[in-house]
Amino acid sequence: MFDLLRRLRRPPLIDDALWRDAVAALPWARALDPQRQQRLRELAARFLHEKTISPIGELELDPQQRCLLAALCCLPLLEFGREGLRGWSQLIVYPDAFRVNRSHTDAAGVLHEWQDELIGESWEAGPLILSWADVLADCEAPRAGFCVAAHEMAHKLDALDDLLDGTPPLPRPWQREWARDFQQAYDAFVADVDAGRETAIDPYAAEAPEEFFAVATEYHFSDPVLLREQMPAVAAHLKRFYGVSPFA
């Protein structure tokens, strides 16, 4: 009875032809071995079953494009599993970069308001937001050091323990090692950026520990050799957390 109920809860499999077309358009999926590719297919099926994909404006997404988005978002979950989909229900897709209003009240009580132009955003308990144009750009240059979907999914994993700090939920001994190694690498990187030294890694990683983790995640999937050269301890943790990069 338990096995029957578990099977009933499984989302429907992605159609063979649809999956074939999505993989053909997704360089990371094409580079996976058959076992991991099958795992990605199962995760993507669950994503499509559980998440609402909402294109904005005049953007329309056909089934193959929705499948591609699901697979790309699930790429960081190959080792972590479906638990990484917990806590949110919607993927919002803009045609291109989008603007968001920001505000901040400083120590003197002065309110500052401005607009940011973003290609992705992840709300701690809300939707994941992506620019479709930038998803396509990442797919066209998958080894260029950028992967906006992986970046935003790293934030979703980070937030699973209700603390956005650059450390996702981990067994306690590993969590201590992760926090130590990431903090050391982050401090050294921030010192380089603050001193005006050119960095091989995107300087946006110096914004905060959670951005450091998310940017490092992009490099794990898009330029793992560079990440290993620049930050070997960080690269080793991400290899353990995400599995071997498709481009290793």
Image (spheres, helix red, strand yellow):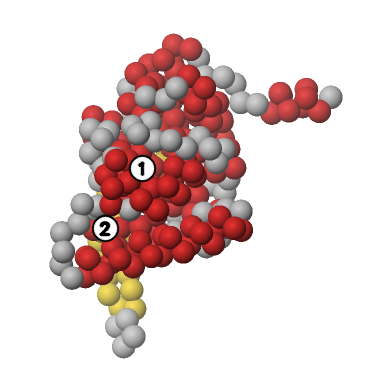
Q: Is residue 140 above or below residue 92?
A: above
**Mark 1 Cα shell of 10 Å, populated few (<14), some (14-19), many (≥20):** many
The dot on residue 204 is 2
Figure quadrant of the C terminus: top left
Marks 1 and 2 in Cβ contact (< 8 Å):
no
**Residue 115 image position (x, y, % from top left):** 25, 61
From the image, which quarter does the N terminus lie in?
Answer: top right
Image mark for residue 220: 1
Closer to us: mark 1 or mark 2? 1
Q: Is residue 156 above or below residue 209?
A: above
Few, some or many residues within 10 Å of mark 2 (<14, 14–19, 20+): few
For the residue pair 184 and 3, the one nearer the viewer reads as: 184
The residue drawn where x is 26% and y is 58% is 204
**3 or 91, which lies in front?**
3
Please, what is the three-letter code of the amino acid marked with disc 2? Tyr
Q: Give the percent coordinates (x, y) of residue 77.
A: 50, 38
* Kind of element beneath mark 2: helix
